[in-house]
Amino acid sequence: MLGFDVDEQKVSMLNKGKSYTKHIASKQFANYFKTGAVQATTDFKQLKKVDVIIICVPIPLNEMREPNLQYIESTGAVIAKYLRSGQLVSLESTTYPGTTEEVLLPLFSQK
């Protein structure tokens, strides 16, 4: 499994088997990273290697309590650069129904 993040410090910690959040102890997932079963990277060119892409980004709310989709949009734009035929993309972030079709599909269809 290959995980992607834009934060180089988080990626470095994960690849060393260390947790960057106090909610999850390092020992819970350290073996996955130490054995190489799971790796983290900031190199989004490696998206071409995976068959399934799961998008899980924060969705802040604006003043009107509507979802701010900036992270979905920016992540989708990066994925679109490296997307290849046959890959499955799943949006797992909490947002309104239709976000995948309205926001991501147009980005991915431009390819």
Image (cartoon, rainbow, N blue to C red):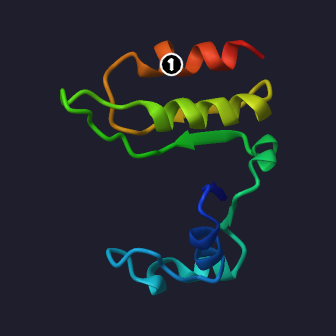
Q: Quadrant of residue 8?
A: bottom right
| x 48%, y 78%: residue | 19
Q: Quadrant of residue 31?
A: bottom right
Counting every numbered tag in the picture gives 1
Which residue is farthest front?
A: 63
Q: Quadrant of residue 64?
A: top left
Residue 73, how many percent across, how many down? 53, 29
Q: Quadrant of the N terminus?
A: bottom right
Q: Is residue 54 above or below residue 106?
A: below
Q: Is residue 109 above or below residue 39?
A: above
Crowding at label 1, few (<14), some or many (≥20) Cα neighbours within 10 Å? some
Image side of residue 62 versus residue 48, left or right: left
Which residue is farthest bottom?
A: 27
Which of 28 and 66 lies nearest the eye of the viewer?
Answer: 66
Residue 48, how many percent across, how many down? 81, 41
Q: Which residue is mark 1?
A: 103
| x 47%, y 45%: residue | 56
Image side of residue 68 versus residue 11, left or right: left
Q: Secondary structure at mark 1?
A: helix
Q: Is residue 97 above or below residue 19?
A: above
Residue 42, how many percent across, how many down? 70, 58
Which of 50 and 67 lies nearest the eye of the viewer?
Answer: 67
Image side of residue 23 versus residue 65, left or right: right
Look at label 1 and name its amino acid.
Val
Image side of residue 80 versus residue 28, left or right: right
Q: Quadrant of the C terminus?
A: top right
